[in-house]
Image (cartoon, rainbow, N blue to C red):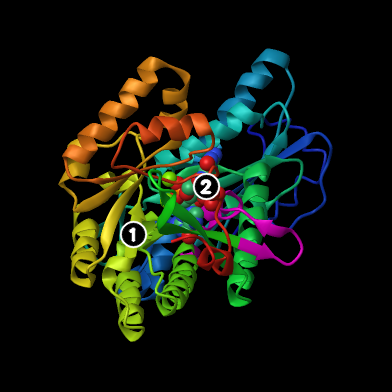
Amino acid sequence: MPTTMSCPQANAKPLSRSPRRAASPQTTSHSKGNRYLSVCLKCLGFLGTDVLFGAKAQDVLYASCKRRVERSLRAVLEEAVRSLAARRDTNQCFELQVTIHAEVLQISVVARKDVLNDRRAQELVNSLLTSLTKPTRLTGETLMLAPDPRIGYHLGSVAAFDKASFALARASLNNPVQSYDARQRQLRLARMRREAEIRDGLRRGEFVSYFQPKIDPRNNKVVGGEALVRWQHPKKGLLMPKEFIGIAEESSLICEISRAVAKQTITLLTQLKQKAKAVPIAINLSEQDLKGPDLIEQLGRQLKRQNLKPELINLEVSERVASMNEEDLSEFMKAVRKAGFSLALDDFGTAYSGLLRLLQLPISEIKVDRLFLIKAAASAQGRSILQNLVCMLLEQKFRVTVEGVEKPRELKILKAMPGCFAQGFYFSPAVDARTFQGLNA
Ligand code: C2E
Ligand code: MG
Ligand code: MG
């Protein structure tokens, strides 16, 4: 049953809306002078108790929480009213209602603005958390269960349990209390819409792999290629990876994109082989792709089916690979080794990574980020850094590719460093598969 409390003072004036009506979660009537704190509270520690001890046991646990919650909220609210009455000689009232809806305690507090301000709302929510830190005894059992609460709340001019419930969904172990944030919700909705769009795009086959040639700067010959995905969007035209890779990486969609790219790469390799022009093609992998052997095994099977050698596939991973969990990494490496693919380290030098750990990985190629080339073109010191870096990597028997060659001056710097390869707009941007086949190999 809901609990409605009014001001402790005997001559308390009612709230401007009827004091007899509890602040029902469904209520829409509101008065200008009141604020509404809507709270949704779930006890994660009670999950599963109904299966173990029956639904009644969970009722007992929640009833005990409800009592604690009511007690602590009433204490804070009464104290607030007392302090205001002493200062300004005004009587203030509040209404409190606690109900249970499908394992969620719905708490509604209605009070005048001066009783229920932002600071007090925080205080009330914190008091909830404190009141639930002690374990709860399960009747008839000696079990003491920690409620482990998660709380979502919203303070506004009407009761808004939908907003409190949205905030609750964001609560986590590290941040058990969350307030409603309209901007966050908009961002999440936008992201979900974008994810749905990507999913549709994948279904319609709109993700197309382009290929950028890798060049030997000594003779300008194509010695390989890199698959770079584009989204042929029906309304927005050709979209670059920065428009969708980030969102896809936050879900499993990136793995589907990688599978599409891998398939198109095999098709290109098959066509190149028919023209006796096969060169190794690199595929970019995201962290999610490294979390299981699926993609590698699928690539291996497809290559075999087309009678293509595994040396024709090069996998590009970023420096973040160095911070991956040991177990995932070792399973991935095992699959790569078994399939016979080689690994390249992309964007070398752009992120902090344990160089020693990186060098322990079976990486055969390093792709030096364009930033080094920009610095090299700008100063003698930058040139010396790049030259020494490339020299050290070549000495360590890595294949070295410098990324982002745009200008003749940059190419000149590379030509002074025999043994490294180049990629960049100076030679060619990424082009569609048909154009790539026409390039000079
Ligand atoms: P990346 O793997 O380092 O690829 C090189 C990027 O540099 C490409 O951008 C390429 O178009 C661009 N680039 C090439 N030459 C030049 C140049 O001379 N100057 C400059 N300024 N840029 C140059 P793109 O295609 O926009 O791709 C950006 C990033 O998106 C890639 O960086 C890669 O990290 C990611 N990406 C692209 N395709 C895939 C994919 O299929 N899967 C995954 N997981 N990531 C991908
Ligand atoms: Mg790359
Ligand atoms: Mg790169």
| Residue 410 x, y percent position in the rendering | 47, 31
- Residue 127 as seen in the image, left or right of residue 346: right
Q: Amino acid at mark 1?
A: Leu
Q: Quadrant of the C terminus?
A: bottom left
Q: Secondary structure at mark 1?
A: strand
| Residue 16 x, y percent position in the rendering | 82, 38
Q: Amino acid at mark 2?
A: Phe
Which region is colored magenta? 231-253
Q: Which residue is tagged 2?
A: 427
Residue at 46% of width from left, 77% of height from top? 271
| Residue 404 x, y percent position in the rendering | 48, 40
- Residue 30 as seen in the image, left or right of residue 269: right
User: Residue 152 in magenta?
Assistant: no
Residue 27: give its label.
none
| Residue 251 x, y percent position in the rendering | 48, 60
Q: Which residue is tagged 1?
A: 315
How many neighbours does mark 1 have within 10 angstroms: few (below 14), some (14-19), or many (20 or more)? many
